[in-house]
Amino acid sequence: PGGLPPVRGHEAQLRHILLGLISNAKRAMAELPQPALRLLAATEGGMVRIVVEDIGPGLPAAVAADPFRPFVHGREGHLGLGLAVARCLAARHG
């Protein structure tokens, strides 16, 4: 978006992070009559900060305590690796 500096990093990994967060948000809002998703981007301390917000019900308490721990998930049939991988990839980018 205009006004933001270029972001250096591995394009496929950064795309994976954002698409994973958006996909999680869409799943969380699947039952809502009017889902809403907001993406925000701004510079903060010389870095670009990206925020993905949704109006879903939030994470179950057991997951919310440590959502980035591998194999923690709020739905059956999911491995619980999405946020753990996203965090690892984001950390590699500083």
Image (cartoon, helix red, strand yellow):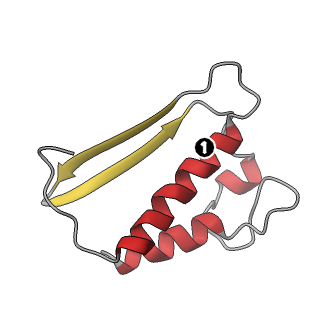
Q: In which quarter of the image is residue 1?
A: top left
Q: How crowded is mark 1: few (under 14 residues within 10 Å), some or many (20 or more)?
A: many
Q: Quadrant of residue 34?
A: top right
Say whether residue 56 is left or right of residue 46: right
Say whether residue 65 is visible. Answer: yes
Residue found 33% across the figure and 41% down from its top: 40
Say whether residue 71 is left or right of residue 66: right
Residue found 54% across the figure and 27% down from its top: 36
Disc 1: which residue: 25
Say whether residue 69 is left or right of residue 86: right
Task: Give the image location of residue 74, x and y in percent.
Answer: 78, 53
Q: Of all residues shown, which one is farthest toward the right? A: 76
From the image, which quarter does the C terminus lie in?
Answer: bottom left
In front of the other: 25 or 59: 25
Say whether residue 90 is visible. Answer: no
Three-letter residue code for mark 1: Ala
- Give SS at disc 1: helix
42 in relation to 63, above or below = above
Residue found 63% across the figure and 60% down from its top: 67
Give the number of callouts.
1
Task: Give the image location of residue 91, x and y in percent.
Answer: 39, 75
43 in relation to 79, above or below = above
Task: Give the image location of residue 65, x and y in percent.
Answer: 65, 56
Task: Give the image location of residue 49, x and y in percent.
Answer: 29, 53
In front of the other: 24 or 83: 24
Residue found 56% across the figure and 58% down from its top: 20
